Amino acid sequence: MQPLHGLRIIEFDGLGPVTFAGMMLADIGAAVFRLTRSESAAPAVFDQVGGSVLHRGRAAVPVNLKDPADQARILELIDGADAVIEGYRPGVIERLGFGPQAMQTRNPALVFGRVTGWGQTGPLAQTVGHDLNYIGLSGVLHAMGDADRPPAPPLNLIGDYGGGAMMLVVGVLAALIEARTTGRGRVVDAAMTDGSALLGGLFQALRGQGMWSDRRGANLLDGGAPFYRCYACRDGGFVAVAALEPRFYAALLEGLEISPEAAPQYDMAGWPATHAHFADLFARRDRDDWANHFDGTEACVTPVLSLAEAPDHPHNRARTVFDQGLPGPAPRFDGKPHTPRHSSAVRLEEAVALWSAEGSTVRSEQAG
């Protein structure tokens, strides 16, 4: 049994962040009904392919949000829910009749989680955008990539997932803990711009102290340091080098047969020359040869695996990180991997019947 067993959540189906948040909550044991519309706004490839991961663990409930009969049944579901999560533009859910104020009047303990790009307020609240736009405004995107090239998109991991979905999950769980005591729910405003800015907080602090430059590729953690970056190998593969601590750097130099005097770790003026030396050495052997060479050392050198290779790595296989080639739930509890539940589909009236017999977890505990 997972920690969120017994928790009931309604997910208004949407794009990446709310879908990822719903997956995480379901992976940890929550019962989630995903209300789906026939006119999905998601690109078809995300629905058809990404759905095998992002939609797992929940029951898809087809609904017409403008049909009075469906609206009435959705209200019944929300009356018995502990939380709602949605990712519409500000004001949309209110116009559909399911806004937080109205829903918390019906169900005072309800936690209402909202994830958007710009937030519920502010000059850009109604502006369209995607992950790249949000992390661009947060300052984080500017730090990504090489010095002589435009900023490099870090997939959609920072805005959609790190700054959006995970902040939404943290906010919803925090509000649910409070609701168990107070019987009052909260409205969680998770903005991807806010969350992305928070993820970049350390670098803003370092910049303020003169310890970080806005010039890409010139800093400790952005590839500027020769001991914290990726290197190309003879076969076209890459290795990741992350020898930050002095003893790890010493192990790296030993493995490369370089004397410490020839490459002082924090001689920033010498970093370009050290980088060129490292690059020349790593280019002389294949990726897996280097991985084997450094295996068992403290040099912090590992292979950079492709998406296709990662599921078959011995470590990932030993921990069952992947299930049939797709990543399993994380984190794990009590050291045991959890097999994700498959997605399913139920009719709206069936969903109402499933939840009608019992009250929500939060309100049941409150009554006790």
Image (spheres, rainbow, N blue to C red):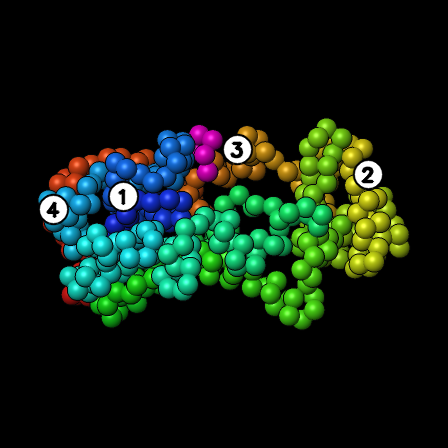
Which numbered disc covers residue 281?
2
Which numbered disc covers residue 282?
none
Separation of marks 2 and 3 at Cα, in angstroms: 29 Å
**Above or below for 364 versus 250:** below
Question: Which comes before the other along the chain, label 2 or label 1?
Answer: 1
Question: Which comes before the other along the chain, label 2 or label 3?
Answer: 2
Residue at 39% across / 36% down in the picture?
A: 43
Separation of marks 3 and 1 at Cα, in angstroms: 28 Å
Separation of marks 4 and 3 at Cα, in angstroms: 47 Å
**Mark whose residue sits in front, 2 or 1:** 1
Separation of marks 4 and 2 at Cα, in angstroms: 69 Å
Q: Nearer the viewer, residue 80 or 358?
A: 80
Residue underneath mark 4: 68
Q: Amino acid at mark 3?
A: Pro
- Chain part drawn in magenta: 323-327
Marks 1 and 4: CB-CB under 8 Å? no
**Above or below for 272 versus 348:** below
Mark 3 element type: helix
**Mark whose residue sits in front, 1 or 4:** 4
Q: Main secondary structure of the magenta part?
A: strand
Residue underneath mark 1: 34
Classify residue 212 as left or right of residue 353: right
Separation of marks 1 and 4 at Cα, in angstroms: 19 Å
Residue underneath mark 3: 311
The quadrant of the picture occupied by the C terminus is: bottom left
Separation of marks 2 and 1 at Cα, in angstroms: 52 Å
